[in-house]
Amino acid sequence: MSFSEKHVSEGDSPGDLVFVLVAFLLCFAILIFRVQNLDYQYDELISLSYSQESWSSLFGIHWWSDTHRPYFYALQKLWNGAFGTDPLAVRSLNVLLGALCVPLIYRIAARLGGRDVARLATICLVLTPLFVYQSREVRMYPLLNLSVLVGTVAFLSLVDRYRTGAVAGRIAPLIAG
């Protein structure tokens, strides 16, 4: 059995699911703890300002004027509309985005290195000061982290499907040209 097949054929055990759930909840608790007491930094005020712009401004002038595309600002705008604009409500979007990285890190590390590596990687993520800081800040970094991790999981899934032949018939003609 190859490395890839070993990890694909192993399902998640109940212990894995419990570990990921506990790590997710711990991460969420760490990130949300006293988050409403943090003062907004200058960059965060820019994010808040952009998220209060009209939709046409976000996807019109700000599409070209800001170095970051307005996806985060649009998501923050929707979030603020649903949950309000007090600091806890505003910051909770990124807390959630950060916590959603936990199961993805576990999945990637388990696929590449097994369960022990996955558990270590998950613990390291949850306790990394920069990850905690970014996931509490009203900026686009947690969305970026989550997007990269989703893309990595999708890529590894495609690799596994290709190796098992599930998509080889569709991809081979494209590669052959």
Image (tube, rainbow, N blue to C red):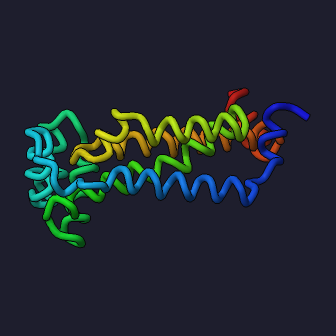
Q: Is residue 2 above or below residue 61?
A: above
Task: Identify the residue shown where x is 12% and y is 52%.
Answer: 48
Task: Identify the residue shown where x is 71% and y is 56%.
Answer: 15
Answer whether residue 87 is visible to the viewer in this image.
yes
Splitting the image into 4 quarters, where does residue 92 fall? bottom left
Answer whether residue 61 is visible to the viewer in this image.
no
Task: Looking at the picture, tell me which residue is in the foreground, 59 or 170.
Answer: 59
Q: How many marks?
A: 0
- What percent of the width, then of the height, locates residue 51? 15, 55
Task: Identify the residue shown where x is 19% and y is 65%.
Answer: 80
Q: Is residue 126 above or below residue 93?
A: above
Q: Is residue 99 left or right of residue 109?
A: left
Splitting the image into 4 quarters, where does residue 90 fall? bottom left
Task: Identify the residue shown where x is 37% and y is 50%.
Answer: 30
- What percent of the width, then of the height, locates residue 129? 35, 34
Quadrant in the picture for the C terminus: top right
Splitting the image into 4 quarters, where does residue 144 fall? top left
- What percent of the width, then of the height, locates residue 174? 68, 34
Q: Is residue 19 above or below residue 130?
A: below
Q: Is residue 162 left or right of residue 52?
A: right
- What percent of the width, then of the height, locates residue 137? 23, 45
Quadrant in the picture for the N terminus: top right
Looking at the image, the residue that sits furthest to the right is 1
